Image (cartoon, rainbow, N blue to C red):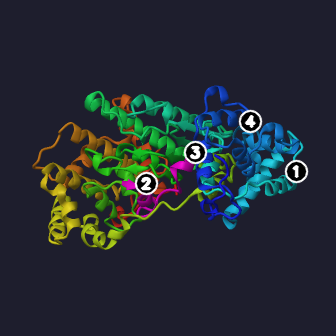
């Protein structure tokens, strides 16, 4: 198509643009075009020639002029200086040996600096490293980039500029162990999968050259980030898988006390595997992140919910009793106050690479560099749909966490009070109340949360395992209340030492059970289990409200 003389069709919203709307739409199609394999490495001239045969209405000279305006030229047209800078920008710093040593200067005192300063420091560090390979100067590079920056002449520019970014490298970063869940699991987390991941975690702990561990899922077409635990093999198979999850959970917590562990959650997380993500506060979410608490057939990852004790009372109860609430990034960071950052799915891979490069910063600056990179890359996740219910949560659901009466009685009272509101939201919320099974499940949740909030980490794990075994094995009847069920499970259930070392239960002494190490547990509780005699003159009942310390934040 020739340039039209009709000036009314020119794009006027961008200064300096003399291309018509029709031309810009056609030129954008050039970037959207899927090139044949034979042309992927062709010259710009060859691609233009090919594309004009696909769309004969395009004026090839106008297309070339537009590409030049955008700073895109054929290799034969580039100067030696331009080729040098192209090689520099294409260099893979994520796997460059020794580059991580320069990152200390990038992130030191970074809490007092802004995103622009961090980006400039990072660019200077890359120039310093690359100057060992080729002669390159930072000031000359910046001057060249400013003089040759593409002119803002196209309203579609933000689209094609993102598309031409190089594919992110999230599979290998120097000094960072990356566990890609796409290589281990798809539809469910099996015992074998969990054990394989745990082996990688243990290796990362022992390797002095590893500064951080990241868990990602590179498969963009898979909806689940952390799928559900496998229940294959009946009750025994499900319990084996749960034990494997707990062993991995303990290993991740232990590693996180030594080196930062970060999750890049781009997909759904099943309630049964939520505990794995809660082993660290370093979690980065995408807009595809979600948790559906209602899909759990019985209480699971109890300690993960109970440890959210800093929330306004009743918030967790509101979530877990809700019949159809899906938690997304805005709720996770908003009402729950969790997560280190939020990144849109469109930029997720490239932002992940940049954060992982920061995670390769040597200790003791690793965790700070990682967190600052998360802040730099993060965007607003959107409004939280839980916070707007704060008055209702305080009025109707806070008593579920604080009542001294049984869980079932508290739940019945909440149902009656909400029912009397007579508003559409109340009617929708109480859709579960017509099912005795759904009511019973929520009553057990409430009772388990109450008990778990008074427990140390190791006890909470034991409660989850024993409660799961009791419910899956139908070792209770309808006459038993939720509160009495939980109390019985606590009194009669296995200890965490017996659970995590199930293969040697018969040969295990009581001393072994007392001395088992659980990373992240309250240090006073650990001292008590190892030597109860030291506390024989202390009134333990007087400090029964003591809460465990969280060292992972």
Find residue 349 and name its label.
3
Q: Magenta span covers which residues?
A: 327-349
Q: Nearer the viewer, residue 466 or 381?
A: 381
Extreme residue in the right direction: 135
Give the residue drawn at x 70%, y 49%: 66
Q: Nearer the viewer, mark 4 or mark 1?
A: 4
Going from N to C along the chain, the mark reached first, 1 or 3, is 1
Question: Label 4 to label 1, Cα distance in Å?
Answer: 31 Å
| Residue on which the image places disc 4 | 45
Going from N to C along the chain, the mark reached first, 3 or 2, is 3
Going from N to C along the chain, the mark reached first, 2 or 1, is 1
Question: Label 3 to label 2, Cα distance in Å?
Answer: 42 Å
Q: Is residue 343 magenta?
A: yes
Q: Nearer the viewer, residue 472 or 361?
A: 361
Residues under numbered marks 4 and 1 in contact, where contact means CB atoms less than 8 Å apart:
no
Question: Label 2 to label 1, Cα distance in Å?
Answer: 58 Å
| Residue on which the image places disc 2 | 525
| Residue on which the image places disc 1 | 137
Q: Nearer the viewer, residue 453 or 494?
A: 453
């Amino acid at each position: 198509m020739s340039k039209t003389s009709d000036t009314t069709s020119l794009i006027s919203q961008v200064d300096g643009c003399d291309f018509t709307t029709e031309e810009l739409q056609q030129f954008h199609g050039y970037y959207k075009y899927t090139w044949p394999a034979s042309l992927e490495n062709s010259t710009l001239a060859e691609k233009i020639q090919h594309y004009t045969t696909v769309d004969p209405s395009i004026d090839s000279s106008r297309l070339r002029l537009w590409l030049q305006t955008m700073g895109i030229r054929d290799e034969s047209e580039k100067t030696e200086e331009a080729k040098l800078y192209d090689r520099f920008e294409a260099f893979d710093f994520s796997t460059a040996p020794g580059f991580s040593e320069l990152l200390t200067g990038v992130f030191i005192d970074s809490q007092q600096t802004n995103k622009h300063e961090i980006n400039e420091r990072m660019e200077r560090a890359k120039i310093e490293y690359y100057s060992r390979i080729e002669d390159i100067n930072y000031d000359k590079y910046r001057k060249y980039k400013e003089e040759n920056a593409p002119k803002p002449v196209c309203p579609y520019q933000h689209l094609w500029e993102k598309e031409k970014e190089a594919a992110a490298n999230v599979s290998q970063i120097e000094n960072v162990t990356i566990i890609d869940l796409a290589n281990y699991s798809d539809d469910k987390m099996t015992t074998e999968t969990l054990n394989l991941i745990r082996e990688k975690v243990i290796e990362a702990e022992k390797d002095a050259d590893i500064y951080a561990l990241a868990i990602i899922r590179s498969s963009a077409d898979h909806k689940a980030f952390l799928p559900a635990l496998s229940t294959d093999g009946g009750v025994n198979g499900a319990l084996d898988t749960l034990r494997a999850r707990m062993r991995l959970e303990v290993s991740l917590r232990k590693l996180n006390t030594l080196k930062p562990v970060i999750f890049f959650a781009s997909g759904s997380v099943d309630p049964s595997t939520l505990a794995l993500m809660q082993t660290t506060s370093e979690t980065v979410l995408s807009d595809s992140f979600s948790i559906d608490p209602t899909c759990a057939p019985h209480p699971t990852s109890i300690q993960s919910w109970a440890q959210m004790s800093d929330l306004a009372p009743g918030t967790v109860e509101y979530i877990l009793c809700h019949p159809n609430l899906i938690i997304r990034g805005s709720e996770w960071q908003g009402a729950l106050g969790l997560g280190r950052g939020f990144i849109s799915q469109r930029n997720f891979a490239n932002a992940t690479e940049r954060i992982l490069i920061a995670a390769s910063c040597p200790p003791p600056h690793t965790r700070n560099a990682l967190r600052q990179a998360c802040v730099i890359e993060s965007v607003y996740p959107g409004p939280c749909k839980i916070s707007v219910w704060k008055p209702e949560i305080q009025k109707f659901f806070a008593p579920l966490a604080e009542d001294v009466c049984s869980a079932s009685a508290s739940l019945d009272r909440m149902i009656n009070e909400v029912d009397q509101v007579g508003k559409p939201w109340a009617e929708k919320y109480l859709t579960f109340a017509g099912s005795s099974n759904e009511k019973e499940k929520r009553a057990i949740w409430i009772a388990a949360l109450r008990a778990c909030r008074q427990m140390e980490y190791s006890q909470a794990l034991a409660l989850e395992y024993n409660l799961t075994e009791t419910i899956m094995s139908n070792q209770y009847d309808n006459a038993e209340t939720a509160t009495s069920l939980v109390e019985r499970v606590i009194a009669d259930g296995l200890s965490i030492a017996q659970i995590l070392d199930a293969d040697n239960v018969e040969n295990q002494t009581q001393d072994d059970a007392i001395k088992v190490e659980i990373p992240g547990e309250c240090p006073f509780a650990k001292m008590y289990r190892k030597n109860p005699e030291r506390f024989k003159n202390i009134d333990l009942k007087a400090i029964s409200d003591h809460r465990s310390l969280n060292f992972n934040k």
